Amino acid sequence: RQIRRETITGGWQRLRHLLPVRQDERDADDIHAEGADDADAARAEREARAAARSIVAWLADEAAAWPRGHAQQPLSVWLERLDATLDKLAMRDALAADDAGRQMLDALARLAELPDDETGAHATLAQHEFRAMLSAILESVAYKEPSEPSTSRITILPLNGARMRRFDGVVIVGCDDAQLPSSAAELMFFSNQMRRELDLEDREARFAQQARDLAEVLLNNDDVVLTWQKVGARGEPHHVSGWIERLSACCKRAGAPIEASAAIRTFEAEARPASMPAPAAPEHVPARWSAAAYNMLRRCPYQFFAGRMLGLAGLEDMSDDLEKRDIGTLLHRVLHRYHQEMRDQDERDNDRRLARLREISEHEFGALIRDDGNALGYYWRWREVLPSYVQWQAAREAEGWYWQGGEIDVSVDIAMEDGEPLRLAGRIDRIDVGPDGSRAVLDYKTQSALRLRKKAGDVEEDCQLPFYGLLRADAHAGSWVALEGAKDGNMEGNKESSQQRAGQQREVDLPDFDAAVDALARQLRQDVGRLRRGAKLAAFGDASACTYCEARGLCRKGFWESTALPDLT
């Protein structure tokens, strides 16, 4: 899941840096969790991260043992390396315990015979050539299903394959006029007339041979069933073969009719449009909530039911394309490192601050640019933002607000009426401390300040910032920080007006922050309480919620008889 979340499609170095040792893991012995559950959860996460690092290092070391590049190596070198990998990764025993695995090992064992012949002894291959050969050999081997020895078996044959053979029973399929007799398409230079003149087999000769084959099957076997379809795949009518009609007429005159109607079992499915689904699942209400989970519930309760309560959300797709989310994660890392250094060094000079921020940005973006050149455009756009960001930070500090911490994982419990606390968890992008010791939470957004001002007018759209306020009870202010948009590279001139412009470009305050936090707490308690009491989760999401919804195939929106909201009590 972590690899998919980071969209790492290749490169062992990127995998090695995927799960670095965090500070809380280094100081694990000094951390005293508030409760036993928190301590167990923290210990389990540390153990999981350590195990993941060990697996990645193990695999990377084994991959490094393989010859790299386009160097040519004797076939024996590649085979020895393959055997070593199977043993190192404990794959051989697992494959030997499986039917398909044993057949694959047998196919690989035949590779060992190749260097013994005169050609294989002198063959040299590059790694991609060896992989191609290995793939071709494995594709050429058909899996054979193991079965108990039995005298009864079903054999599928063409009509001429049954010559001089007897069976317990025969079913001849496709006895319609299009398939019996079957006719091969005539070639341009070998028409039937030409074939007769050249004394070659023509259509009439082929038909005569098919008739003899059919007669032989009928005469050599006691039980023969002839079947045909009245309607083709595209709805076109089919008629029984003329040969079968002639046979039927002859048998009828002899007093032994051969026609019979088979009652075929049919399975019909009919689409029955229903009303809006509204299931209830109080036993699946999560005990732990994040801002993303609650946003999903408010966006569409049925989407929340399928994705979070039933756990049907699929794994994130891997993509070679650089996504804006990846850039957002990188910018978070850049700013966290930058602010931590500035606080520790107590740096106040804006020019030196800007120079250091550019250095950190270049270092963090450098690795990504080497893997994906599309990151270069994002990097230059970010460099244009840096001067105004430094100015905004200086203006904020002039008001008495200083960076205290960032990328902080927090979890709190909220009391509920039923006595079972509600656990809220999330990661706060940034916390600032004010002149009077008060705290403010900030949420970085890779959006322009103009879009964020529209967001401030409708806090119901995204509850993340008020959710930060629930996670930190000592926070009484909240803002979004735009990491895109207009730039102001002028570090000279009127300092006060320059800082004011920077603030307008970067920061958007959430008005009535405390009121928004209190309203979210009340709404959250009410909604979760109703879910625990069995409230129904209707699929009333709007078009924006349905566009990329993975649960669309479950709720069947677009096939309902009525879109009226059902009774949710």
Image (tube, rainbow, N blue to C red):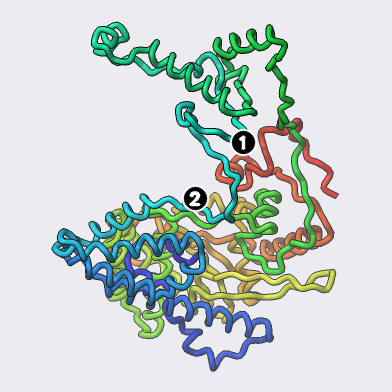
Dividing the picture into quadrants, the one containing residue 565 is top right
For discs 2 and 1, the disc positioned in front in the rendered view: 1
Query: Considering only vertical position in the picture, is 554 above or below 51?
Result: above
Query: Considering only vertical position in the picture, is 191 above or below 420?
Result: above
User: Relative to residue 252, is residue 351 drawn left or right?
Assistant: left
Q: Residue at x 48, y 67 (%)?
A: 2
Checking the image for residue 422, the label placed there is: none
User: Relative to residue 218, is residue 420 drawn left or right?
Assistant: right
Residue situated in front as seen by the camera: 337 or 197 = 197
Tell me the distance, in whole angstroms, between the alpha carbons under discs 2 and 1. Answer: 78 Å
Residue situated in front as seen by the camera: 493 or 213 = 213
Q: Residue at x 38, y 75 (%)?
A: 87
Among all residues in the image, which is located at the extreme bottom? 30
Q: Secondary structure at mark 2?
A: helix
Dividing the picture into quadrants, the one containing residue 53 is bottom left
Q: Which residue is mark 2?
A: 451
Q: Position of residue 86 (x, y in %)?
A: 38, 71
Residue situated in front as seen by the camera: 233 or 527 = 233
Q: Secondary structure at mark 1?
A: loop
Circles 2, 1 touching at the beta carbon (< 8 Å): no
Checking the image for residue 168, the label placed there is: 1
**First in sequence: mark 2 or mark 1?**
1
Q: Residue at x 67, y 37 (%)?
A: 557
Q: Position of residue 27 (x, y in %)?
A: 50, 90
Q: Residue at x 30, y 53 (%)?
A: 374
